[in-house]
Amino acid sequence: MFDTKDDRKKMEGIIDRFKTEMKKVRTGRAHPDMLSGVKVEVYGQFMPLNQVANITASDATLLVITPFDPTNIQAISNAIRSDQSLGLNPSDDGRVIRVPIPPLTEERRKEIVKHASAKVEEAKVALRNIREDARKSVKIATEMSEDVKKRAEKEIDELTKEFNNKVEAEFKTKSEEIMKL
């Protein structure tokens, strides 16, 4: 009998990564995860923003960043400003950085959905790669009869379809959230 537990675990890992990527996608409301992809050059190396500062959402339209070391304020501001996919313009008062989240225009919302759909395609490609690897291992298995191989391939295809549907559902939820005014 063919076991799909390892393939399921790999596919669940892809879904988890996809959900993490979707959290980074901007929806018009301030959320600390929006800045999770920002890398700041401090102490001669690039570090994730959450390792050099505390990020909070004071309300739906403002992120407040409190650096652990106040000398890094300029580097943090520059890192946020230079990330064009965010389109944010931070301001600082010497102690904290305030990042106002502007309301999204219809055009910008569509652009964000398009960007998110690229992440969907990446996840689906990764799922297909796992499916192909599993199908190859079934084909080369000599101890299996043809009937068992056919059942295993069908099981792998159903598993892939299940996880593709999860990706689609997550994307649909996120795109509705983005397009909501």
Image: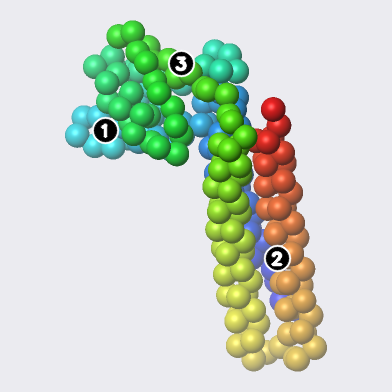
The residue singled out by tag 2 in the image is 160
The crowd level at tag 2 (other Cα within 10 Å; few <14, some 14-19, many 20+) is: many
User: Residue 9, located in which quarter of the rendered image?
Assistant: bottom right
Q: How many marks?
A: 3
What residue is pinned by disc 1?
41
Quick check: 149 left or right of 66? right
Q: Find the distance from the CA under tag 3 to the CA under tag 1.
A: 19 Å
Q: Secondary structure at mark 3?
A: strand
Residue placed most toward the observer, 138 or 114: 114
Q: Is residue 23 visible?
A: no
How far is mark 2 from mark 1, CA to CA?
Answer: 40 Å
Establish if 106 lies above or below 74. Answer: below
Left or right: 180 in relation to 126:
right
Quadrant location of the N terminus in the rendered image: bottom right
- Above-or-below relation of 91 to 181: above
Identify the amino acid type marked 3: Val
Work out whether residue 108 or residue 169 is closer to the camera in this orientation and state it.
Answer: 108
Q: Which disc number belongs to residue 171?
A: none
Residue displayed at 70% across by 58% down: 163
Q: Element at badge 2?
A: helix
Where does the image place residue 65, in percent across and percent down from the top left? Answer: 42, 18
Q: Residues within 10 Å of mark 3 (few under 14, many from 20)?
A: many
* Earlier sequence position, callout 3 versus callout 1: 1
Q: Judge left or right: residue 85 versus residue 28.
A: left
Q: Position of residue 25 (x, y in %)?
A: 56, 38
Residue 64: mark in rendering: 3
Q: Residue at x 59, y 58 (%)?
A: 121
Between marks 2 and 3, how big is the CA–CA gap? Answer: 41 Å
Q: Quadrant of residue 67?
A: top left
